[in-house]
Image: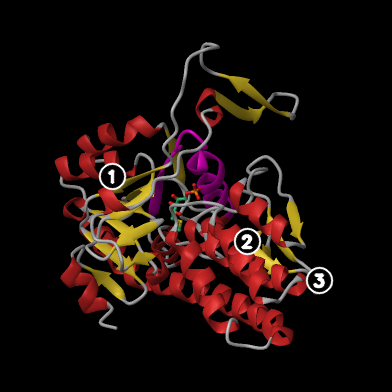
Amino acid sequence: MNVSGRPTRTIWPSADGAAVEIIDQTRLPHAFVTARLGTLADAAHAIRAMLVRGAPLIGATAAWGLWLALRADASDAGLAHAHATLLATRPTAINLRWALDRVRAHVAPLAPNVRAATARALAVQICDEDVALNRGIGAAGLPLLRAIAARKGPGERVNVLTHCNAGWLATVDVGTATAPIYAAHDAGLPVHVWVDETRPRNQGASLTAWELLNHGVPHTVIADNAGGHLMQHGRVDLVIVGTDRTTAAGDVCNKIGTYLKALAARDNGVPFYAAVPSPSIDWTVRDGVREIPIEERSAREVTHLAGRLSDGTVAEVELTPVGSPAANPAFDVTPARLVTGLITERGIAEATAEGLRRMFPS
Ligand code: MRU
């Protein structure tokens, strides 16, 4: 997508060919800053500290991280260490394991002297594929928005609610949940997005709002608790969220709070879709609530908040009484029965084991 008029991805090889560059997402929306990853440790840190985040981008960064690692040590032991180090960075997004296993499977049988170059080519391929998958999700989801627009009066807006950031910043480009939104906006439909702020890290308020603003998509940031009220009053036509891991039976694991939106959507007859690129499907898991590991992040993300002061500096403030404990589960699982459909790169699948199998027979 464009940043200040320039086509930009979230991750790219540096011009000197010696490193990988990323957008440091911890600095958005107040500063657009890039960071250079030159080593395995840099890549692992970028994922763990959420300079990059979002399931597809975590996977892409890990693939680049294997390249960085193999340049320094292409032995079997080096490969195993790099795979384990990157896999340990964040537990929930399945794209991390998917990308690491894919690169390892390709390079492990090769002689050490060609492993790094092969890993690099695969990292490039994974990034390009991610963009193509997301464009497929955009094409598959666009008819949903067209149908809503067709039911409405001329000029009446199509209101989509989204949670967290499943936009281009969460992927290499285009985004997953945002792909149908950008496709609708670019096709001239009057789309408007309710952006859940997404406490505690505020990926909605900081990232989704920033990218929608940059692309000129009308949007309104809302407190996480406002969605149910808006649905009761007919002000949400459709919910589209992303996913960090969707099970073979269609349970959708996504940013904490997604489940509550699905409950409110069901109670109000609002269609609830998840945008699911195939690398986000974990075919080994059926019961998402019991089997998916949910990342527990620092309590400080709940007790403290960062923001821009009136003098332009960014500062952190404490919200809670000193001494109050806080808990921070980062994801939840929406059971398949609450999901209207899964927007994949191949089309919209029923959120059932049969529906997913029909869409991905192999
Ligand atoms: O903790 P994050 O910011 O990595 O969580 C991101 C999300 O939950 C996204 O909604 C999900 O990864 C889908 S991104 C296309």
Residue drawn where x is 31% and y is 69% of the image: 283
Q: Which amino acid does label 1 sit on?
A: Val
Instruction: Find residue 197 and report its horizontal and vertical position in percent.
Output: 46, 37
Q: Pointer 1: residues within 10 angstroms few (<14), some, or many (20+)?
A: many
Find numbered disc 3 in the image and state the secondary structure of the residue it sits on.
Answer: loop
Q: Pointer 2: residues within 10 angstroms few (<14), some, or many (20+)?
A: many
Find numbered disc 1 in the image and state the secondary structure of the residue it sits on.
Answer: loop
Q: Is residue 318 visible?
A: yes
Residue drawn where x is 41% and y is 56% of the image: 244
Per the rendered image, the range of residues in magenta is: 190-214
Of label 3 and label 1, which has the lower sequence position?
3
Q: What residue type is labelled 3?
A: Ala
Residue drawn where x is 24% and y is 60% of the image: 286
On the picture, is 42 further left or further right than 250?
A: right
Residue highlighted by disc 3: 18
Eyeballing the image, is 176 above or below 300?
A: below
Instruction: Find residue 99 and report its horizontal and vertical position in percent.
Output: 51, 70
Any mark on residue 10, and which? 2
Instruction: Find residue 219 and report its horizontal and vertical position in percent.
Output: 45, 45
Residue highlighted by disc 1: 236
